[in-house]
Amino acid sequence: MAEKEQFDRAVRDLIWNIVEIHSQLEEIHKGWAELLGITEPQWLILMAIDELDDGRGVSGIAVANKLRIHPAFVTNQTKKLEQMELLARIISPDDARFLQMSLTEKARAEMAKLSDKRRALNSTMLTGLDGESLDYLNKRLTSIAKNSRLAHQKLSLGLL
């Protein structure tokens, strides 16, 4: 097989592997969400807030950017999560035009109940990979994600 054909085949295999992984992760997220009585997007919002919160809360824009979704959707869903007492939304002390969101103790307790199952699931998914391998893989995936955004921009602008 010629080098170009081999590269094209490897790219197609990579893309289909990513599609498969995305599909499986979606199903896993739906399962975690169901255990908490929320939707998959709401689960992802809670996960993003948990990831981004450094103790001062997180803006809706930061959550939207992390999840690559529209800020209005984040606002709509976080209001629902607040009603369910899984999320606290307070006015930012730095700028009253913005809200800072953080998980409630109820949310943290519910997520803590899942932590052993989540660890076991992660272990199953990543069997055969050690920390160094995961670090290497994450660096490469970060690069692919960055390059994918650039490729999308070029395609959108008609440059490809």
Image (cartoon, rainbow, N blue to C red):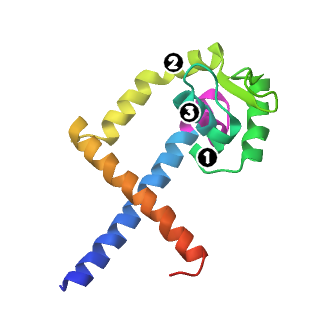
* Above or below, comparing residue 38 to residue 18 in the picture: above
Q: Which mark's residue is nearer the viewer, 3 or 1?
A: 1
Camera sees residue 91: yes
> Please, what is the three-letter code of the amino acid marked with disc 1?
Asn
Q: CA distance from mark 3 to mark 1?
A: 13 Å
Relative height, residue 13 to residue 53 (above, below): below
Graded by Cα atoms within 10 Å as few (under 14), some (14 to 19) or many (20 or more), the crowding at tag 2 reads few
The front one of 65 and 17 is 65
Reading the chain from its start, which is encountered first: label 3 or label 2? 3
x and y percent of residue 128 in the render?
Answer: 21, 41
User: Which three-letter amino acid code belongs to the residue tagged 3?
Assistant: Met
Compared to residue 2, the image places residue 124 above or below, namely above
Query: Circle 3: is it few (<14), some (14-19), or many (20+) Cα within 10 Å?
Result: some
- Labels 2 and 1: the sequence-earlier one: 1
Image spot of residue 156 (x, y percent): 60, 74
Disc 2 marks which residue? Answer: 113
> What residue would you read off at disc 1?
65
Residue at the spot x=21%, y=39% of the render? 132
Instruction: Check if residue 38 falls in the magenta segment.
Output: yes
Give the numbered dot on residue 47: 3
Magenta-highlighted residues = 31-43
Q: Given the image, on which type of amino acid does mark 2 rest?
A: Lys
- Pointer 3 or 1: first along the chain: 3
Residue 150 belongs to magenta span? no
Res 130 visible: no
Separation (CA) of disc 3 from disc 2: 14 Å
- The residue at 55%/27% (across/down) is 50
- Residue at left 75%, top 29%? 99
